[in-house]
Image (cartoon, rainbow, N blue to C red):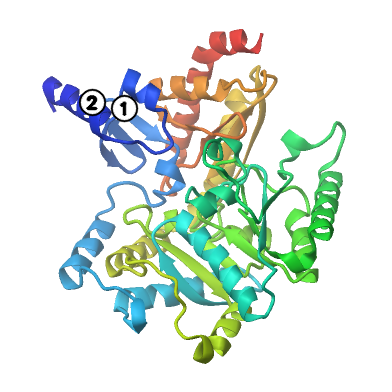
Amino acid sequence: MNEFTNVSLDRMDRASLFHPVSSIHDITTHGPQIYTDAKGVEVTRDTGQTLLDMGAGLWCVNVGYGRTELVQAGAEAMQKLSFQHFFGGASAEPTIRLADRLLGLFRETVPGSDMARVFFGNSGSDANDTAVKLVVYYNNLRGKPDKKKIISRQGAYHGLTMTAAGLTGIAGYHTAFDLPGKGVLHTTCPHHFGFATPGESEAAFTDRLIAELEQMIAREGADTIGAFIAEPVMGTGGVLLPPEGYFARVQEVLDRHDILLIADEVITGFGRTGQWFGSGTYGLRPDIVSLAKGLTSAYFPMSASMISTRMWEVFANASEKTGAVMHGFTYSGHPVGAAIALANLDVMTREGMVDNAARLGPVLVDALQSRVGGTPHVGDVRGVGLMAGVEFAGFPAGSAPHKIVAKHAMQAGVLTRALPYRPVTSFSPPLCVTEAEIIEAATRYDRALKAAMPELDALHG
């Protein structure tokens, strides 16, 4: 790519693209970062710089970039059946096989689960929209029309369509959009490092969170609350791990009050936590599971919503009287996406990527801890499987030390994401990453943090 073409693309981008979750002012002033190639865990910019992608895109390129098996599966599917809608009972082989495989995989790896059916969509956001609509549908069919409110959590990220953005518990995504809307409640973020009182143990912190949840249900009325939505690990919020005993206690409260559990596994699904699903890692028994990202390793936009037996039986028993379930998308169950997802699961299974995430997760945390854990301004280093976070502490409210560090990290040749809720840079490399690549990424990050230190010291005051 010659210099003229580079400049032309830069100008074309500034003049034509509306970037998601980006500052219009920053792009107008500085231009975009244009990427041209990717292979394995590395991405290349139009400047020629190659970077270790410790974000797997947006937590999603689980099998790594450039996997010919997925490309071939997609090409063959396009040639055979380039599209088939699923309205009115229409179907196609790849999607049937994918639904069956997902149900089997979840049942085998999440003890006590009873998933009954799979609904397909296009993104994690629409999967969570689907979850909310199905909660409403379920309770209407049960004769409980007031049982519609959804409890989410501060710091949660559930997507950016109107419903999903309302569930999201990060204020920056609400500003100027009149969110969250009616019927969404947010309880305290379950992040011990950030929200525990001085001297409060994890167990005591959990006690307080559960008491607050009970109080919220009592105040609103259990007969008005349809579901509780939770990520097993809060990804975009800051790689926030649940405190001791948290999910077991939450599950007990929900069961007692007839409140459904929606597990948002858009990030944690498909090996990210070192198990196939975060629900298995933390013992969740969800009624709805939202999946996307790792389903196709981002080679095709596709989501899946798994529905429990107790919900499905209500839907099925009412069907003769109610008729069609009037929900769906043009691309629901797209046969090309399904074929790619099946190939993706084959690669993950054949190459033992879930085991690799479990084995290298402690290596990632140890590599970061040993290099930057004792550095001034670093408050916490944590992780599970191949998702980790470095949290900065002691800075004035509203400052963004992690953005400074992420900028220097890019210059040092490693992509780490500055997250929007806590001052955290996250690490979620492709699950094919090697120990050597993790060590190299941590070494580059350490170098970046040292380079950022004068700016951090000035910001800290």
Quarter of the image where one finds residue 422: top right
Q: Is residue 5 toward the left or the right of residue 317 in the image?
A: left
Q: Residue at x 18, y 25 (%)?
A: 6
Q: Position of residue 383 (x, y in %)?
A: 61, 42
Q: Residue at x 39, y 64 (%)?
A: 345
Q: Residue at x 31, y 27 (%)?
A: 32
Q: Residue at x 63, y 67 (%)?
A: 286
Q: Is residue 202 toward the left or the right of residue 54 in the image?
A: right
Q: In what element is the residue under mark 2? A: helix
Q: Residues within 10 Å of mark 2 (few under 14, many from 20)?
A: some
136 and 404: which is toward the camera? 136
Q: Is residue 133 visible?
A: yes
Circles 1 and 2, Cβ within 8 Å, touching? The answer is: yes
Q: Which mark is residue 398?
A: none
Q: Position of residue 48 (x, y in %)?
A: 24, 25
Q: Which residue is mark 1?
A: 32
The amino acid marked with disc number 2 is Asp
Q: Which mark is residue 10?
A: 2
Q: Residue furthest bottom?
A: 320
Number of marks drawn: 2
Q: Position of residue 409 (x, y in %)?
A: 45, 23
